Image: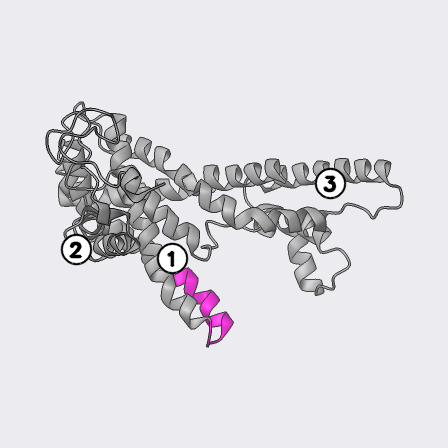
Amino acid sequence: MADNEVQTASAPGEACRNCGAPLSSRYCGVCGQRALDPDERRIGHLLRDALGVLTNLDGRAWRTFIALVFRPGALSKDYVEGRRVYWLSPIALFLIANLLFFLSPPITDFSLSFEDQVTGETVLAANEGEPVSAEFEAFLRGWRGQLHSPLASQLVERRVEARNARQQAQDPQAGRYSVADYRDAYNAVNSEVSKLLIGLHIPFMALALAALFPSRRLFYADQFIVALHIFSFFIILQQLLMLPARIASGFTDAGWVSASFGYLLLTGLLALAVHMAFAFRTVYAAAWWRAALSSLALIAALLAIHLLIYRPVQFLVIHALI
């Protein structure tokens, strides 16, 4: 096909490439799409455009992230009151924060291994044949795990028995399907599934906010927006706090790094409490004493949500997948 037979751009007087309406200017009066420029089909333009997005500090993404970290509550207040065009949408902000979380190494408190989800007896069954000290074995035999761990162990036992029976029926020469096989399958997908489920905290946080700050002028959706912003900040904060320990893990004692994660998590919760107190002042015009107490109450609610809802759901989802 000859070059003059290939249209490389829309121009005034031509039809809009998006909706087909006649163009009377550089922008379509029906759908708003700008007429294409021939240079926009070159790789150089794509690279310049990408670099501009990343380096433009006046862009919505940069403005939104800066406000999220340094102006607690400002994003939520503006969004609830209708000033939205200046910022990224709360859902887009959360998805970007969650993408950063998804691409990073897992935070162990959100990504619980098989051993953390079941009772000590089931852990011993998974480690059958592996030497353990008498003290550790005695500890595991008395370890009941979390509130849902006894039920989780029962589900594991039934799954292992069913799969072993089916495997033996299909091939009597095949080896036994064991708890260790289940454990390995569970831990293989644990990290990815836990990262996908982390947003499960948000709708329950919104309910807690509605209970802490009842208001006729705020709908549940408004509380959900506040919860989205708070949780997005928490995800980003955890990544920033964990980064030094992850870097240090390459050249220092592993035991020190493991212990530091606990302290960094507590530091993150303290920073979250301060951030939320300022946010509550901005969004709800709460007095300082109420904002401080409410931030502590929401952290307690978040921990309850994490222990009583997120962790059991995480196990059940992985159990259904493997």
Q: Residues within 10 Å of mark 3 (few under 14, many from 20)?
A: some
The residue nearer to you, when weighing 78 against 16, is: 16
Name the main secondary structure of what is drawn in magenta: helix
Q: Is residue 256 above or below residue 226?
A: below
Pointer 2 residue: 57
Secondary structure of the residue carrying numbered label 1: helix
Report the residue that reaches farthest toward the left: 25
Q: Nearer the viewer, residue 207 or 291?
A: 207
Left or right, residue 295 beside residue 77: right
Crowding near the residue tagged with mark 1, few <14, some 14–19, many ≥20 C-alpha atoms within 10 Å: some
Mark 1 is on which residue type? Answer: Leu
Which marked residue is nearer to the observer: mark 2 or mark 3? Answer: 2
- Residue 172 location, x and y as percent? 89, 42
Q: Position of residue 210 (x, y in %)?
A: 27, 30
Residue tagged 1: 265
N-terminal label among 2 and 1: 2
Q: Secondary structure at mark 3?
A: helix
**Quadrant position of residue 171:** top right
State which region is magenta: 250-265
Nearer the observer, disc 2 or disc 1?
A: 2
In the figure, is residue 147 to the left or right of 166?
left
- Report x, y in % for residue 115: 61, 51
Which element type, helix, strand or loop, lies under badge 2?
loop
